[in-house]
Structure formats: C-alpha cells, structure tokens
Amino acid sequence: MADDSKTARPLEYYRKFIEKDVRPDDRNLEEFRPTILNIGCVGTAEGSALVKLGNTTVMCGIKAEIAAPKTEQPKKGFIVPNVELGPLCSAMFRPGPPGDQAQDLSSFMNEVVKHSCCINTEDLCIVPGKYVWVLYCDLVCLNYDGYVTDACVLALLAAFKTTCLPTVTMDEDTDKLETDDNKKSPLSIQCLPVSSTFTIFDENILLVDPTIEEEALSTGEVTVVTTNDDQLCIIRKPGGSALSPQQLDLCIERAFLRSKQVVRLIHETMNSVDR
C-alpha cells in the first residue's frame, strides 16, 4: 500500500515523512548520503577516482597531453572537464551528443576549477611559450540517483589528488621533448573545493543531498561550493523557489561542515593507500 501511495501520490507520500523531520530513506533533512571514495581505479590514467554518493556513482579519469599554450598566456596550461550522462546511468538520458544537463555540468566543473583556484595553471607549463600540459578530465556517471553535481566535484578533486605528471625536458639543440615516465611529480593542489547541494521542498523546506525522487519533487535548488581554507567559492541558484537570507545562511553553514567531512574522507583514503 505504501508503494502504491508513493507511485500515485509521491508528493503526499514525502510530506508524511518530512512532517516528522525524516525522509523515506531514513535520513534526517540535514543528512548527506553515505559517501564512498575509491582512488587510483583507472590504471591507464594519470589520475582517477570513483565516488559513490548514496547510489549516485561517478568515475573520473584524468589524461595529460602536451600542447602549445595560448599566445596571450604563454605560461598557462589547460584543464578541460567533460561530464558524460549516458543511457547506462539512467533511462532519462539518450545516446548521442551531450545533452543540456551534461553540458551545464561540464561548464560548472570548469567554474569550480577556475573560481576556487585549486590548480595553478602555470604549474602546467613545460616550456614557456612552447609547451604546456592539457589535463582532460573525463567524468562518467555510472548510476544517476539524484543531483550528481556533488559527486562530480568530489570525483574530480580526488582524481586531481592522485594525478602525477611525468618529467619532461627539452633538448635545446633539437627542440624535441623527452619524457621520463619513471620520474613523475604529483600535481600541486592549492585548495580543496567541495560542492553541497540543497533542494527546496514545498517552497520552504530544505533537503540536503537529494535523491532522484526528491529532485523531481523539488521546487528549487541551490549548490554551494566552499574550500578547505574556509572560503566561499560559488553559490549557484538556477531558479525555482526563492531562499530567504536565513535559509541561504543555513545552506552556507552546512556546506562548510560538509566540506570538512569530505576533506577528511579524502585524506583518510589517501593515507590508507599510502600505507
């Protein structure tokens, strides 16, 4: 009978739970889903990570290539995030070119990297004016069960943390590059950006880390990106129900708490691999 109610009247079904400050998956309104992180899972990539946020699963692999820099920025390399939302992760998506949501997510990943300054692109310079590194960051959603942004940001960040680039030198006589794959250096990370998403239910109730069902029933959403050095990086409010200043302050406060949890998870995962 409960399943019938959930299917026929999903909004009323959720309201019965939320009136008791709980959700159908037994989380309270302020609770994020369990987060699992696996790093170094793609052996052919320079860096990689797999994130499972509840049932939402995202894998990130980073490949490095050498290219010429822009003329106006001779010492800066490039970071190119690309998010793939294919039919294997959800029936919502179709085969073919990236849809609007995937393109929007790719753009947002680029914003996170740019505005957080987590990577100094001058660190990707090999020979000024001639050669720089390009980091292609492929983010593939393996299972879509709710707002995927937070999982993508965490997967990208964890993949950055595992990325090592080979030593490259240039022969001044021949102008040719020599790459030593036996000597690799870890990518320098300036800070750790963390994304936290909140949805608005019934126009005034905040739900942290929504599932796909909560996402469908929401009347609005907001994503807050903070860094481990206590900086507020991005507030993304694409539309829907408005937030009061008090609600926005609450989202920011919870985002900073979430940031500490995620950074702790990354450090614990990295330390367990190093042992």
Image (cartoon, rainbow, N blue to C red):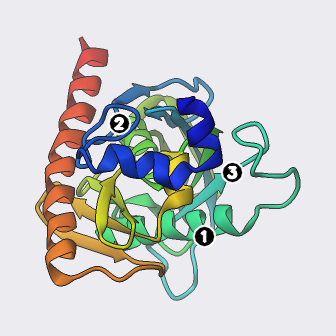
* The N terminus lies in quadrant: top right
Q: Which mark is residue 84?
A: 3
Q: Is residue 26 left or right of residue 64?
A: left
Q: Amino acid at mark 1?
A: Asp
Q: How much space separates mark 1 and mark 3, taking CA atoms?
A: 11 Å
Residue highlighted by disc 1: 104
* Residue 57 image point, x, y percent: 54, 35
Q: How much space separates mark 3 and mark 2, taking CA atoms?
A: 22 Å
Residue highlighted by disc 2: 33
Which residue is found at the position 62% from the left and 35% from the top? 4
Which residue is found at the position 63% from the left and 28% from the top? 44
* Residue 263 image point, x, y percent: 21, 42
* Residue 149 image point, x, y percent: 47, 55
Q: Is residue 106 left or right of residue 163?
A: right
Q: Is residue 182 left or right of residue 207?
A: right
Local crowd at mark 3 within 10 Å, few (<14), some, or many (≥20)? many
| Residue 1 vertical placement versus 254 (above, below) | above
Is the Cβ of the residue at disc 2 closer than 8 Å to that at disc 1? Answer: no
Check the image and name the residue furthest to the bottom: 72
Check the image and name the residue furthest to the top: 275
* Most foreground residue, 77 or 170: 77
| Residue 245 vertical placement versus 202 (above, below) | below
* The C terminus lies in quadrant: top left
Q: Amino acid at mark 2?
A: Arg
Element under label 2?
loop
Q: Is residue 253 left or right of residue 207?
A: left
* Residue 17 image point, x, y percent: 34, 43
First in sequence: mark 3 vs mark 2: 2
Q: Amino acid at mark 3?
A: Glu
Kindly indicate the quadrant of the structure image that contains residue 186. top left
Element under label 3?
strand
Local crowd at mark 2 within 10 Å, few (<14), some, or many (≥20)? some
